[in-house]
Amino acid sequence: MVILFDQFHLPEDVYEVIFATEQQVIVAKMLIKEMKGNDGVLGKAGMSLFATKLHEGSIVEYEEEVGPVKRKKSIKVSYNKRQFYDRILTPMKTMGMIDYDMYKKVYMISDKFSKSLNKIGLMWIQEIKKAEY
């Protein structure tokens, strides 16, 4: 997955940097909220249940900012189960936001995303310090 961002118009919400649509942002937030409610871990069955609930349609409340005012808004979120795995879970796994333990068969919130971004920053510093020949 490629992340393109404008350093001068960086959103305050990390999800908005990573995902292209508002619905993807909402679904990713729902997933992390679900995982946090379960001590940062979700088993395969739990993940499947979450994806099924999304597929069937869920009511979710989220805050909408209109200028300085924040309003709570309820919307129905329906997200195809396969698209959830392809567009939300898989990118979050490949970027290191979520880790999967093959032995325990659980998904876990991970800090590898942050570590990868730090590594990319160091790679850039090394690149600009290279001597040109």
Image (cartoon, grey):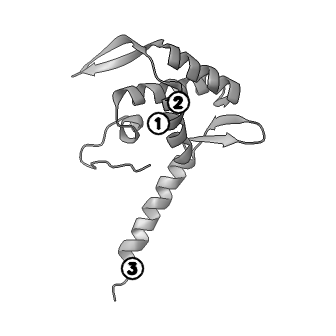
Depth check, front residue: 76 or 128 = 76
**Any mark on residue 87, and which?**
1
Going from the N terminus, do you reach mark 1 or mark 2 first?
Answer: 2
- Report how far apart the C-alphas of labels 2 and 3 lie in the structure: 44 Å
Which of discs 3 and 1 lies nearer the camera? The answer is 1
Image location (x, y in percent) of residue 40: 63, 30
Q: Is 25 drawn above or below residue 130 in the view shown?
A: above
Q: Is disc 1 surrounded by few (<14), some (14 to 19) or many (20+) residues within 10 Å? A: some
Going from the N terminus, do you reach mark 3 or mark 1 first?
Answer: 1
Q: Amino acid at mark 1?
A: Arg
Q: Is 8 drawn above or below residue 107 in the view shown?
A: below
- Report how far apart the C-alphas of labels 3 and 1 lie in the structure: 37 Å
Task: Residue lying at the far right in this picture: please name it.
Answer: 103
Per the image, the residue denoted by label 3 is 130
Which of discs 2 and 3 lies nearer the camera? The answer is 2
Horizontal relation, residue 86 to residue 71: left or right: right
Horizontal relation, residue 15 to residue 40: left or right: left
Q: Residue at x 48, y 56 (%)?
A: 118
Q: Residue at x 38, y 76 (%)?
A: 129
